[in-house]
Image: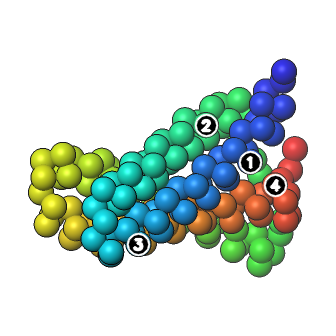
Amino acid sequence: MSAEAIGAILAPLNATLNFASAILLVLGYRSIRRHQVHRHRAFMLGAVAASTLFLVSYITRFSLTGAHSFAGTGLIRTFYLTLLLSHMVLAALIVPVVLRLLYLVRRRRFGTHARIARWTFPAWMYVSVTGIIVYLMLYHVVGYLP
């Protein structure tokens, strides 16, 4: 199987993992708002797992096929590149924060965990949802240059 064929399989898998992460984040948020701590933990660990699998899959796809150039021009290109840049910056910043949240839970420092999680949740949701939008724009709406 060629690198391009593997990349064609991994790209929709990555979008699916981003979607799964977003759903698990919403379920985890809903659970903690209902004081269902065990459900919250399960959903959030699922979101961490989905995001971790995404990262491994994305790095694999990128190493096989490289970066893709967005085929759109004009305003849609500006929108895409702005979205992509904000997605990439937040994705890089969110990793150590999520690791910190896991550490705080492990140390049973729930107050600090909750304070950090309040602003981490929307950032992580943004990364998950914009990852799906970037995928759709690059592979289904506009396309990329070969």
Q: Which residue is drawn at 50% across and 48% down?
A: 51
Q: Decide which of tag 4 and tag 1 comes sooner along the chain.
A: 1
Q: Work out how far the residue at label 4 is from the one at label 1, CA to CA, in angstroms.
A: 9 Å
Q: Decide which of tag 2 and tag 4 comes sooner along the chain.
A: 2
* Residue 32 drawn at (x, y percent): 32, 69
Viewer-nearest residue: 74 or 42: 42
Question: Which residue type does callout 2 highlight?
Answer: Ser
Tag 1 residue: 12
Tag 3 residue: 30
Would residue 113 appear left or right of 131 to someone viewing this image? left
Question: Which residue type does callout 3 highlight?
Answer: Arg
Q: Residue at x 55, y 35 (%)?
A: 56
* Few, some or many residues within 10 Å of mark 2 (<14, 14–19, 20+): some
When asked about the image quadrant of residue 121, the answer is bottom left
Q: Which mark is residue 57?
A: 2
* Residue 106 drawn at (x, y percent): 18, 46
Viewer-nearest residue: 76 or 4: 4
* Residue 33 drawn at (x, y percent): 32, 75
Q: Can residue 100 be seen in this view?
A: no
Question: Which residue type does callout 4 highlight?
Answer: Tyr
- Could you tell me which secondary element the residue under label 1 belongs to? helix
Q: In which quarter of the image is the N terminus?
A: top right
